[in-house]
Amino acid sequence: MEPSLISPHSGKTLSIMGGTYRIVIPSKDTNHEYAVIEMVVPPGGGPNPHSHKDFHESFHVLEGEVECTTADGTVTAATGTTIVIPKGGAVHNFKNKSDKLARLWCTVVPGRLDEFFEEAEATHGDISKLEAISIKYGQVLLPPDYWEK
C-alpha cells in the first residue's frame, strides 16, 4: 500500500443517529485492519449504550464535548480528549449534552464499523433491522435507559 493524501471533504457521508458520519478511511482500503470515521454529533445526539467485544475503538474530540458513560460512571470529554474503548465488550456510549456541535475522530481496529454504519443508515431507524445488522457486526445494542437500571 502506498502513502496517500486524503482531502478534508473526501469520503462517504452518512446520516446516523441524528449525526453526520464521514468515512475518512474505509476498512475496505486497509484490508479491514482499521477504519477512520469523522463524527459530527449535534446537541442531544450520540448512540445508545452498546458493546462490541471484538474491536478496539477510540474517539478523539476535535471540537466541542461529549459525555462518555461506562460502568465506571460518566465523564465529560472536552476538545483534545481521547476516549479509549478496548476490545472486550465494555458497555459504553457518548452523548453531546452541550448546545454546540461536537466533532469526533473515531478509529476502530480492526475495521468494519464503517460498513456497519453504512448498513445502519439504510434501516432509517427500524430497530429490528438495526438489531439484526448489529449482530452481524458483533455489536450488542442496549436500550437508551440502560444506565438507569
Image: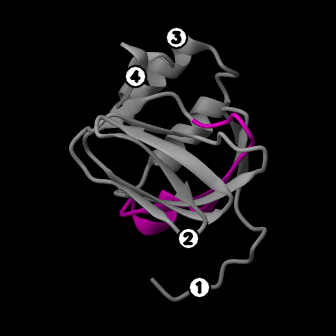
Compared with residue 63, is residue 121 higher up or lower down, i.e. above or below?
above
Query: Which is nearer the eye, 89 or 145?
Result: 145
Q: Quadrant of residue 8?
A: bottom right
Q: Is disc 3 placed on a helix, strand or loop? A: helix
- Residue occupying image coordinates x 47% and y 16%: 145
Query: Which is nearer the eye, 14 or 50?
Result: 50
Q: Mark 3 points at which residue?
A: 128
Q: Give the range drawn in magenta.
A: 21-46
Q: Where is residue 47 in the image (x, y as percent from the top left)?
A: 55, 33
Would you say residue 97 sits in the magenta stretch? no
Query: Which is nearer the eye, 26 or 66?
Result: 66
Q: Mark 1 points at which residue?
A: 4
Q: Position of residue 136 (x, y in %)?
A: 38, 29
In the rendered structure, are the residues bearing label 4 and label 1 in contact, judged by CB atoms less than 8 Å apart?
no
Mark 3 or 1, nearer chain start? 1
Q: Name the residue under label 2.
A: 80
Mark 2 or 1, nearer chain start? 1
Three-letter code for the amino acid on which mark 1 is drawn: Ser
Cα distance between the residues tagged 2 and 3: 36 Å
Query: Which is nearer the eye, 132 or 73?
Result: 73
Mark 2 or 3, nearer chain start? 2
* Of marks 3 and 1, the one in the foreground: 3
Cα distance between the residues tagged 3 and 4: 22 Å
Would you say residue 30 sits in the magenta stretch? yes
Cα distance between the residues tagged 4 and 1: 42 Å
Image mark for residue 56: none
